[in-house]
Amino acid sequence: MAPENSNVRGAMPGTVSQSHNLQTRGIIFAIAAGFLWGVLPIYINSVNAITPYEIVAHRAIWSAVLLAALMPFLGGFGQVITLLRQRKLQLGLGATTVLVGINWSVFIYSVQSGQIVQAALGYFIYPLVALLLGVLMLGERLDRMGWLAIALVACGVIAKSTFAGEPPVIALFLAVTFGLYAVTHKKLGIDPVKALFVESALLLPIGVAYLWWLTDQGLPIFFGGGAINISLAVLAGLFTILPLLFFHAGNRALTMSMSSLLFYFNPTTQLMVGIFIYDSPFTMADAVTFGLIWVGIAVYFATRPRTPRPVV
């Protein structure tokens, strides 16, 4: 089976150099996205949200506002309207909007309920899902060691289910929804900023309606009010769009398999935050589960073909 990133013989040095630079930028973006997502539980636990949906509402509202402010510098709203005239993109962005909204809600619930370790497990499983979907939906190929890595990660999930007596529902739900979200975005192949703007705009009325309902029930919005809480609510938009923009930039520059494996910076950081900052329990069963997954990651990266450095 051919390697995923095999070089073309006789490629011009300039072309090789450009490809190498593009891959390097993609790796940097992917790592930055993983780190920002990894520390997101700190933000979630810093706000006094009544329900997870209040944070989701603010993420949608302020993401839409911030991205709308960027649109004039990125081709204007006319290009967005042109994109949305295509039936395929309408359906695709509608699907990604639903997926990201569900994923946000489940993730915030897991953090607020003290299940940060299971949330981290979900994002450790995510690359397994993304690798499989990349094969099924994008026609990407895996060698034998790639399949071995997937099998080891699958054994980790089975171990977790066996020790706990039930499957890790939150973890699996996060992995599947985000895997579908990432692969659908890559398949659509459109500018990530414009796609994020459309998704946020579609979620905007739902977010506004939910905050209106909270007000109608006599409940506070903006996490209780006050200058600090209002600022934290607005920052929800920035904490949402920055890692997503980095993620999509890396996702477009790299193969699905490479970008999904680099995504492990997210759950690794998240796991450390949960254990060392919030004292989340980490049992022997968790050690076995994560150990199998980490071995799978090591197998995958250790067996990737080395890309030769370009001659300049």
Image: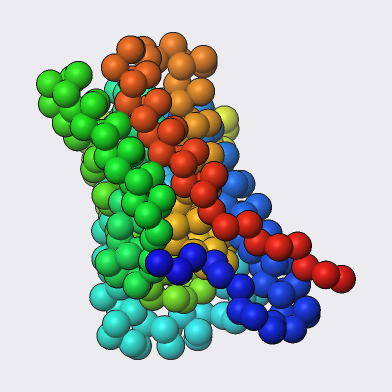
> Which quadrant of the figure contains the C terminus?
bottom right
Give the residue at x 49% y 38%: 298
Q: Quadrant of residue 92?
A: bottom left
Tell me residue 152's x, y (percent).
33, 38
With 109 as the anchor, is 232 left or right in this view?
Answer: right
Specify whether residue 49 is in view: no
Q: Is residue 105 above or below residue 165?
A: below
> Which quadrant of the figure contains the N terminus?
bottom left
Q: Is residue 52 above or below residue 45?
A: below
With 282 as the anchor, is 11 left or right in this view?
Answer: right
87 or 126: nearer the viewer: 126
Q: Is residue 102 above or below residue 77?
A: above
How many numbered marks does the figure carry?
0
Please say which color scheme the image uses.
rainbow
With 171 as the anchor, is 260 left or right in this view?
Answer: right
147 or 244: nearer the viewer: 147
Specify whether residue 121 is in view: yes
Give the residue at x 75% y 62%: 309
Give the residue at x 34% y 21%: 288
Tell me residue 187's x, y (percent).
38, 73
Give the residue at x 57% y 57%: 305
With 269 as the anchor, is 219 left or right in this view?
Answer: left
Q: Is residue 141 above or below residue 210?
A: below
Tell me residue 241's x, y (percent).
52, 54
